Image (spheres, rainbow, N blue to C red):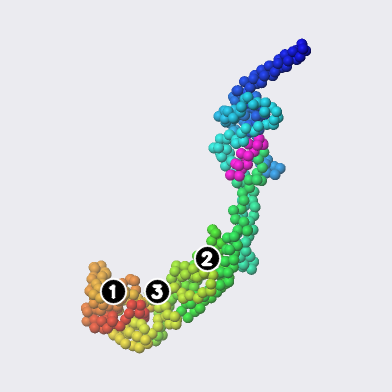
Amino acid sequence: MKLKKNILISLAAVLVVLGGGYVYKSLAYQDHFLPNTQVLGVNISGKTPAAANTALKNHFQKQHYAFTDGTKTVATASGEQLGLDQNYSALLKKVKSSQNPWRWTESVIAASKTDALKTPNVNQSALDTYISQTVAKLNATRKAPVNASVQSDANGNFIIQKEVAGNQIDAKKLKAQTLTAISQDKDTVDLTATYQEPAIKSDDSKLKAAVSKLNAISQISGKIQIETHTITIPTATIKSWLSYTNGQVEVSKTGVANYVAALNTKYSTFGLTRKFKSTKLGTVSVPGGTYGWGIDQPKEVESIIAAVKTGKDFTKEVIYTGSGYHKDGTDIGNTYVEVDKTNQHEYVYKDGKLILDSAIVSGKPGQDTPTGVFAVWDKQRNATLRGKNNDGSDYASPVSYWMPIDYTGVGLHDSPWQPTYGGDWYQAHGSHGCVNNPPDFMAKLFAAVEVGTPVIVIG
């Protein structure tokens, strides 16, 4: 009986001791971290928040990180450079508040570390600065990735050129890898996982569609009709215009413009010296004047580009500007006004037949009516012609009919002030360059001649 009593007393004493130890420990963990508490790889078990804060700061300030590319270390950084010189008090307080000091035995029994904080406490501005500076330095000697692209092969066919990997660093990837290394308490960052990727790869559906479209377009037949000429655009030329730019199939505006400019040089009649069969002087060479046509190059370029982009064969009439464009290629044609300065006479032909003629007065010597092929570009009634006399004074001559033929003020008009026409009267009494016509004749001329009619001045 006495033995049993002693055993109970001993057992009670042990329980008192154990209970006291448990209470003591529980009270101690009121302001200390539980066993097996780890933050960012740093064991802070049994430390006060202040001591844990110091431990974390010391760990990351002293920690050095190596940035490796394969087996080579290409950059290093201290924790401070990466923005890890921080005060962890607030975060440690949060961790501490999540722990129950009366359940410390569970941490002991578990015998495993508790990673209480997985997100690194980093000064983002400092980290961004380091990352951007490091990336700029490393990328200066590294190759950028090359996107897959559309190219032309040796046969002129369009193909997809496969992308080429590079080894330049992507700043966002490097930052993510660095944060991962910090959070996992690793001291190396593998740069091979941060390489920039080509933005466009060879399996891109848009590239495949573009190649198909380009190859289809490059086989079309394009023809341009210029008067009596049918010009077939060479297949190689059309191919040379094609490209895939900024995600779009493009037709080179510069290439088409150069092609149209060459056509204009070959076929336009502006400034063209012409052979002309005159009424009295036989066949003469007449320099270019205002009469003639040229390709309206801006409009023609846009028209060809639009036609090519359809991907269908086309034949189109050239877009021109000016006068004298005839589908039969006749140029001057058989309806025109002939001004013969040598004979001081004017003839009007319509459909090859002489319908009117009259003596005239042309410009006096020194103010000669210009020779050339011109065209009536306007018709006005009751106009006032203004200019300078030989003495520098101004003149203003009212006329009933005015038909300008160039852009310097020369034209055909009536001249009631002239007492006579023809012969050598023009030598002393000629005009300032215009063609003076008898009033009655000018009325008939005005009625018979349309705007755009060629006016050939010879002699």
Disc 2 residue crowd, few under 14, some 14–19, many 20+, Cα 10 Å: many
Task: Pick whichever, 258 or 115, lies toward us.
Answer: 115
Residue position marked by numbered label 3 in the rendering? 322
Mark nearer the N terminus (1 vs 3): 3
Q: CA distance from mark 1 to mark 3?
A: 26 Å
Say which quarter of the image contains residue 37: top right
Q: Which residues are magenta?
A: 171-187
- Find residue 226 and report its horizontal and vertical position in percent: 47, 77
For image coordinates 61% across by 68% down, the residue present is 156
Q: Residue type at mark 1: give it.
A: His
Say whether residue 146 is visible: yes
Q: CA distance from mark 1 to mark 2?
A: 51 Å
Tell me if label 1 and label 2 are in contact, CB under 8 Å. no
Q: Secondary structure at mark 3?
A: strand
Tell me if label 1 and label 3 are in contact, CB under 8 Å. no
Q: Is residue 177 magenta?
A: yes
Quarter holding the N terminus? top right
Q: CA distance from mark 2 to mark 3?
A: 28 Å
Say which quarter of the image contains residue 104: top right
Residue position marked by numbered label 1 in the rendering? 432
In this picture, residue 408 sits left or right of residue 274: left
Task: Pick whichever, 18 or 267, lies toward us.
Answer: 18
- Find residue 145 and report its horizontal and vertical position in percent: 62, 52
Residue position marked by numbered label 2 in the rendering? 251
Q: Is residue 219 above or below residue 274?
A: above
- Find residue 261 and report its horizontal and vertical position in percent: 48, 70
Q: Secondary structure at mark 1?
A: loop
Q: Residue type at mark 3: give it.
A: Gly
For image coordinates 38% across by 74% down, the residue present is 290
Q: Secondary structure at mark 2?
A: strand
Disc 2 vs disc 3: which is toward the camera? 2
